Each structure stands twice: as C-alpha cells, then as structure tokens.
Image (spheres, helix red, strand yellow):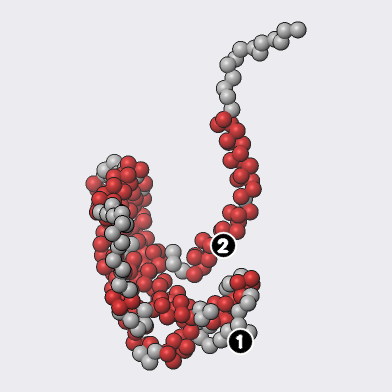
Amino acid sequence: MKLYLFAAAALGLAVPAQAKTPARPPAAKSEAKKPVVDPMQAMSAMLVMFDKLFPAGPDPDPARLAMARGTAATMFPSGAYATAVTGFMNKTLDRVLNMSEADLMGMLPAEQNKGKKAKPPSTEPLRLMLARKEPNFDSKLAAVKAFMGSTMTKLGNAAEPKFREGMARAMARKFDAAQLAEINAFLATPTGLAYGRQTVGMWFEPDVMRGMFEMFPEMIKLMPEMAEDAATLGAQLTEKPSTGKPAAKKQD
C-alpha cells in the first residue's frame, strides 16, 4: 500500500475541494427523510448544559480584576493561539514529509504487513516523492501552510478575548492584590515577557506532547487495580443496609 498517499491527500495538492466531492445520487422515493438538526439549535442546547455544569463564578473585586486582566494579557498575548497551533501543525507536517514509505510501514503491526508485495518499501522522503509527481509541490505546500495560518488566526481572534477574560476572572479570585502585583512585576521583566510569550506554545512542544502520551502505559498498568477498586465500590453500592434487628432463630 502506498502510504505516502496519505500525506498527498492531507495536503490536497491538486484538486479543488468541490471537484473532489462526488455528485450525490438522488434519494430513492421510498427512503424516509431523516429529520434535519439545526446546528445552531444543537449548539444552543449544548451551551445550556455547559452553563449548568460550569456556572459562572462570583464577580471578583473590580480592582483585582483590572490587575488580573493585565496578567492574562501577558501570559496569553494576542496571537498566541494562532502562533502555537500553526507552528505545531507546520512542524508536524514537515516531519511527516521527511519520513519515508518504509518509516510509515514500520509503524504498522507486523501482522498487517504480511502478504504485502515482495518489493521493499521506498526509503526516499515523502517530500521528494510527492515533488516528483507534482511540479508545483513547494508552492502548493506553502499555500496549505498559509491557509492553516490564516484560519488559526481567525479562530484565535474570536476565541482569545473570551479565554483571556475567563483567565483574568479566575486569577482575580485566586490571588489577592499583593500577589497579583508580584506576578505582574515578574511578567514586566524581560524574563517574564519571554515566559508569557512562550507559555501557550510550550504545551505543543514535542517533549510535552510525549509526556502526555507516555502516561498511557502507566495508566494501563493500573487497570487491574482500578478494576478491583471498582468491583469493591460496586459491592458497597449494592449491599443491602442492615436493619439492626437480630436474625430470627430457626425452629427445630
């Protein structure tokens, strides 16, 4: 299987989106029409549930909120979301393109590679293989990255102000005025400014991502013990309460 086609499909190198979508055949007359869900109504219902699960906290002290807004603006500066996510996506895409068919085949379990053709997979980077098939590969790759960047910027411009305000409200309740003043004093230093610019992006660093994934084997090791604990809890929940009365004696 030509696994490098995955990368080609991800890049969308040649065909416009509307040309890729096949014409939908007309529905049979006997086919029952499914109810159409209004996306806005569905989102409204979700927001109602969200509001119940995560109610807004009490309004913080106005003076502390003003200080916390400055803190949030430094720790989550404008454009931080787009910079972090776009950088992560671009680096990941470049790493995939620098891999080879052999690298991708090596990721599959051994049993899935059985019965494949005898010809060994190519060790040539996917980037070179795709560039040979598509003369305008570099320009189209640049266009894809530019599209991702502009899309993330639009999303960030819509989401960041709400996130910063929520962060400011939380910090204004968690820290008093003296603590916020100390935090802001640090963030005003060159080191503090650098820390603020890097805070969001560090969550997308490879070592941090590896740490998140490497916890799963440890969680799997705990599964037997967690299953025993769950069984014990289940027994406690289903245990009938004692009436406090002595058991009746059996008659001879």
Viewer-nearest of labels 1 and 2? 1
Q: Of residues 243 and 17, which is closer to you in this image?
A: 17
Q: For the point 30% across and 72% down, which residue is it?
A: 23
| Amino acid on which the number 2 mark rests in the picture | Glu
Marks 1/2: CA–CA distance: 34 Å
Residue bearing the label numbered 2: 214
Q: For the point 58% across and 24% down, which residue is it?
A: 240
SS at mark 2 in the image: helix
Q: Position of residue 168 (x, y in %)?
A: 30, 53
Does the CB distance between marks 1 and 2 fall below 8 Å?
Answer: no
Instruction: Answer left or right for 57 relative to 90.
Output: left
Q: For the point 39% across and 78% down, which residue is it?
A: 11
Residue bearing the label numbered 1: 119
Above/below status of 83 relative to 125:
above
Instruction: Answer left or right for 49 relative to 93.
Output: left
The answer to whether residue 31 is seen in the rendering is yes
The answer to whether residue 99 is seen in the rendering is no
Q: Position of residue 91 (x, y in %)?
A: 43, 76
Q: For the point 36% across and 56% down, which residue is it?
A: 183
| Amino acid on which the number 1 mark rests in the picture | Lys
Q: Residue furthest right?
A: 252
Q: Quadrant of residue 32?
A: bottom left
